[in-house]
């Protein structure tokens, strides 16, 4: 039997074993059909191929500086795609709730812009790559803005400090409720992740105090770190994360609920920030090879957004040196290339 036939049989067997679901959800009155969303068959084929190709990849390792994350089963692997017209395609461990971690930074940025407008957020946080690790202390010292951008820890803690509220609880509840509207369903804190991170986050407290020295944090530094730690500990599954991405892809309108959750004029700022710093100091590699705004978290999730088309979320806990899920990067790169999603490629808008 030829190698190809063996491979073909293996792929077929895996395809049959893996639980895959495709849900063409009826389009609500508010959600219009996207003229550019990929066709169901194309999407399904690309995602299945990627799942099979990368399923047994064991490179990278779980984050361990947050003790809880070291214990998460490294073999978990889920892929979810939600299109701008609310087609949903899922494969693998898509019901497992993992901590959103740094991907939360995208949505706190959205909420800060909702409250203050983009110009004030830009002035108070900045939007330049640091070229350093996401938790770098030297970056805070060296960057002219000190905060750097909303996605490194320092800039993210400062962004959280911008959220208004009479006390810490009110600010936290506002953030959590906002994430839920972006996801289209209520989200909850994973208490054990929060406790694990809160007991070990001395580095983030140091960053917050350093920002205070430069007058670049806008509420009590330790209160801001605590709310930030909670936002990072919010649980999402791959499907919820893909829907959060699809809300960005759909001009701020959640494709499942039809609600305009994020102002449409804020979307380009969010996607630009994701392009520039979504994968930290791997963002250059990512722009070169994939060409889609994306955001990673040390919990093992990555969400990538194809504007007007939809979003793909992948969860797989093993990370590379920069803190980005190895398998998630490979899957998204594969699917994005197959579906011609690269924003910098003329063929992404149909020019062949
Ligand atoms: O503050 C931290 O270090 C974590 N809560 C979040 C970092 C993170 O997710 C970086 N991502 N790749």
Image (cartoon, grey):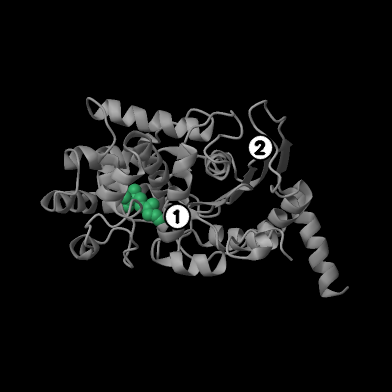
Q: Name the residue located 39 percent from the left edge and 49 percent from the top edge.
A: 102
Residue 239, numbered circle: none
Looking at the image, is 192 positioned above or below residue 126? above
Mark 2: secondary structure: loop
**Up-down relation of residue 225 to residue 338 (above or below):** above
Can residue 191 be seen here? The reply is yes
What secondary structure is found at the residue carrying circle 1?
Answer: helix
Q: Which residue is mark 1?
A: 272
Distance of label 1 from label 2 (alpha carbons): 23 Å
205, above or below 187, in the image: below
Q: Residues within 10 Å of mark 2 (few under 14, many from 20)?
A: many
Outermost residue toward the right in this view: 1
Q: Nearer the viewer, residue 146 or 97?
A: 146
- The quarter holding residue 143 reads bottom left
**Measuring 69% from the left and 49% from the top, which residue is drawn there?**
36
Which one is nearer the viewer's eye here, 37 or 238?
37
Sequence-first tag of 1 and 2 = 2
Give the percent coordinates (x, y) of residue 242: 57, 43
Tell me the quadrant of the picture where the C terminus can be found: bottom right
Identify the residue at horizontal 48%, vertical 69% (top origin).
Answer: 285
Question: Residue at horizontal 43%, vertical 52%?
Answer: 297
Is label 2 within 8 A of ligand 1 (CB to nearest ligand atom)? no
Q: Which residue is mark 2?
A: 86
- In the rendered view, does 163 fall on the left or right side of 69? left
**Residue 268: percent from left, percent from top:** 47, 49
Q: Residues within 10 Å of mark 1 (few under 14, many from 20)?
A: some
């Amino acid at each position: 039997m030829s190698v190809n036939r063996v491979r073909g049989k293996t792929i077929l067997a895996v395809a049959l074993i893996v639980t895959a679901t495709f849900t063409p959800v009826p389009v609500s009155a508010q959600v219009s059909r996207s003229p550019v969303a990929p066709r169901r068959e194309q999407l399904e084929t690309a995602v299945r191929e990627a799942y099979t190709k990368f399923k047994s990849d064991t490179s990278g390792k779980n984050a361990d500086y947050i003790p809880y994350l070291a214990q998460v089963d490294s073999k978990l692997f889920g892929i979810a795609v939600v299109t701008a017209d609310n087609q949903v395609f899922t494969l693998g461990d898509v019901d497992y709730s993992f901590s959103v971690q740094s991907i939360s930074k995208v949505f706190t940025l959205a909420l800060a812009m909702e409250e203050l407008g983009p110009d004030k957020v830009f002035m108070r946080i900045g939007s330049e790559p640091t070229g350093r690790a996401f938790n770098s202390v030297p970056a805070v010292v060296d960057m002219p803005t000190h905060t750097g951008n909303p996605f490194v820890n320092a800039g993210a803690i400062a962004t959280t400090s911008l959220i208004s509220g009479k006390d810490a609880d009110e600010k936290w509840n506002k953030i959590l409720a906002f994430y839920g509207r972006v996801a289209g369903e209520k989200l909850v804190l994973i208490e054990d992740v929060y406790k694990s991170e809160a007991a070990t986050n001395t580095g983030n407290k140091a960053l917050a105090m350093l920002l205070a020295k430069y007058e670049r944090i806008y509420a009590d530094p330790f209160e801001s770190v605590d709310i930030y730690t909670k936002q990072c500990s919010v649980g999402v599954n791959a499907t919820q994360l893909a829907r959060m991405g699809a809300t960005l892809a759909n001009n701020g309108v959640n494709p499942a609920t039809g609600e305009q959750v994020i102002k449409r004029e804020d979307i380009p700022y969010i996607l630009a920030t994701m392009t520039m710093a979504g994968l930290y100091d791997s963002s250059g590699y990512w722009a070169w090879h994939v060409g889609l705004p994306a955001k990673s978290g040390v919990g093992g999730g990555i969400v990538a957004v194809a504007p007007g088309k939809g979003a793909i979320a992948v969860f797989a806990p093993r990370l590379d040196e920069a803190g980005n899920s190895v398998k998630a990067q490979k899957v998204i790169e594969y699917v994005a290339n197959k579906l011609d999603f690269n924003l910098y490629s003329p063929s992404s808008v149909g020019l062949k």
